[in-house]
Amino acid sequence: DTEVTQTPKHLVMGMTNKKSLKCEQHMGHRAMYWYKQKAKKPPELMFVYSYEKLSINESVPSRFSPECPNSSLLNLHLHALQPEDSALYLCASGKNTGELFFGEGSRLTVL
Amino acid sequence: EDQVTQSPEALRLQEGESSSLNCSYTVSGLRGLFWYRQDPGKGPEFLFTLYSAGEEKEKERLKATLTKKESFLHITAPKPEDSATYLCAVQVPSGGYNKLIFGAGTRLAVHP
């Protein structure tokens, strides 16, 4: 069982919808990450939060908006997405050592 | 530009047939090299961290090694349950923080 929990597991949304992906960890890690993964491709880093502050934004379009309400929670707010944004969105936590603990992901389909 | 290249893209083995996966990298300021295993539809699972050339780590049928330019993941007498995608990642500095850059992975299929 993963110690990083992501909800929902599956999400289908239209291009005009607003939705959010949620991630929770209780391992005491102070770094949390969002990755995007397309089929048969490696995970691509989107955002990194360190001590609840946004430390890395890999030039992600503003239709993706991250939020870290506290050290255990990480959200990704979605608005006006495009079909090419359909992917598996992975949340991870870690100690900034590179050893990351990933959730099972949220599979997003944009119609 | 930091780059991580894995080969082969896909590998099919018979149960018990040992082999090696390769990860070559070109990065500035390597902070560590990591191996992850990913099953279909799941998030990657951490396997090993290697920090310096000559270092080796082992876990069950897997052994990871590191040189100055590449890493190998050796699989000894694999079983069907070892079938997965194996991802290599390098940790590099980024604006005062560290980030992981993943290779494209090797899809391993072990047949009985």
Image: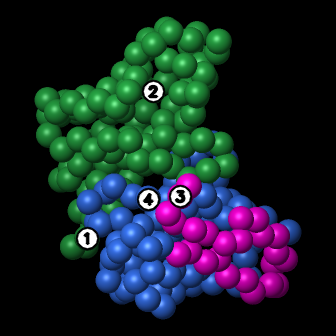
Chain colours: A blue, B green
Q: Are the residues at dot 3 and dot 1 in contact (C-beta closer than 8 Å)?
A: no
Q: Which residue is mark 2?
A: B7
Label 4 sits on a secondary structure element that is strand
Corner quadrant of residue B79: top right
Q: Are the residues at dot 3 and dot 4 in contact (C-beta closer than 8 Å)?
A: yes
Residue B97's label in the rendered image is 1
Dot 1 surroundings within 10 Å: few (below 14), some, or many (20 or more)? few
Marked residue nearer the N-terminal end (3 or 4):
3
Res. B73 visible in picture: no
**Which chain is indicated by disc 4?**
A
Marked residue nearer the N-terminal end (1 or 2):
2
3D distance between C-alphas at marks 1 and 2: 29 Å
3D distance between C-alphas at marks 2 and 3: 28 Å
At x 40% / y 16%, what residue is drawn?
A: B76
Corner quadrant of residue A5: bottom right
Answer with left or right where residue A25 lies relative to residue A17: left
**Which chain is indicated by disc 1?**
B
Q: Which residue is mark 4?
A: A101
Q: Are the residues at dot 4 and dot 1 in contact (C-beta closer than 8 Å)?
A: no
Q: Amino acid at mark 3?
A: Thr
Label 1 sits on a secondary structure element that is strand
Residue A25 placed where, x, y %? 47, 72
